[in-house]
Image (spheres, rainbow, N blue to C red):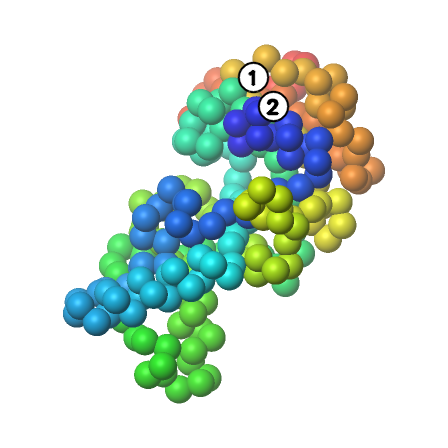
């Protein structure tokens, strides 16, 4: 995350829900073939409905990919927040090079509707594979709302375990401890650096 929003998250111990219309992939919820005009109308209506009722928290399985730091953490000037996520909450994203075949929910037998809806929420184009994304899908009604935004608190089931200071960040461990008291005995602050022999972001053990 960029420094500003990461520090605010640590201050308030909460994560902001991402809504599908605001996400950086315009194909969210549209990972299916939309060959007919009616399919396009129906799926846009479905997307609008889901955007009004649910959102997601997006995580990565890895913290060492420099592209993630470039895209999401202000060109390595921001922070990475590491969490333990309950297995029952975590949903892995599937990556594909081809759009799924369109199947409208009303035409499916009831036992297949949930699985099809799951595919819509978790299918992305294969070029996003580097993110190794895991999602928590949440109803807006189960979050805290403030100024039109939706937040989920952490320190309970969602456990903050580490804060990684980006390679280009001027923040120190003292800056972080000033902003948050640990939610866990295992809470750790890590300063990252660029690896010397690979294209990775790694722990700076010299500090």
Mark drawn on residue 180:
none
Spot occupied by residue 55 in the image (x, y as percentages of width and height):
51, 54
Asked if the residue under mark 2 is in contact with the one under mark 1, i.e. CB atoms within 8 Å, the reply is yes
Q: Residues within 10 Å of mark 2 (few under 14, many from 20)?
A: many
> Can residue 127 be seen at all in this image of the molecule?
yes
Instruction: Relative to 166, say whether 62 is above or below.
Output: below
Q: Residue at 25% of width from left, 66% of height from top?
A: 41
* In-front residue for pair 55/207: 55
Which residue lies under the disc numbered 2? Answer: 165
Spot occupied by residue 140 in the image (x, y as percentages of width and height):
57, 57
Mark drawn on residue 169:
1
Furthest-front residue in view? 147
* In-front residue for pair 43/110: 43
Q: Residue at 61% of width from left, 60% of height from top?
A: 141
> Can residue 66 be seen at all in this image of the molecule?
no
Instruction: Relative to 144, say whether 38 is above or below.
Output: below
Relative horizontal placement of residue 200, taking residue 86 as reference (left or right): left
C-alpha gap between disc 1 and disc 2: 6 Å
């Amino acid at each position: 995350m960029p420094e500003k929003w990461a520090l605010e998250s640590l201050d308030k111990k909460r994560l902001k829900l991402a809504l599908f219309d605001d996400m950086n992939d315009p194909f969210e919820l549209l990972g299916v073939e939309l060959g007919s005009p009616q399919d396009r109308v129906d799926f846009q209506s479905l997307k609008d409905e889901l955007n009004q009722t649910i959102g997601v928290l997006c995580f990565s399985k890895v913290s060492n990919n420099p592209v993630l730091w470039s895209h999401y953490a202000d060109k390595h000037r921001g922070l990475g927040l590491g969490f333990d996520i309950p297995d029952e909450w975590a949903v892995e994203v599937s990556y594909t090079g081809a759009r799924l075949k369109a199947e409208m929910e009303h035409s499916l037998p009831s036992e297949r509707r949930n699985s099809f809806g799951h595919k819509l929420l978790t299918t992305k184009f294969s070029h996003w594979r580097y993110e190794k994304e895991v999602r928590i899908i949440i109803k807006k009604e189960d979050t805290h709302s403030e100024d039109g935004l939706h937040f989920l608190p952490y320190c309970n089931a969602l456990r903050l375990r580490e804060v990684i200071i980006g390679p280009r960040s001027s923040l120190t461990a003292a800056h972080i401890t000033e902003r948050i008291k640990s939610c866990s005995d295992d809470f750790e602050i890590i300063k990252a650096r660029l690896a010397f022999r690979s294209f990775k972001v790694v722990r700076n053990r010299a500090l």
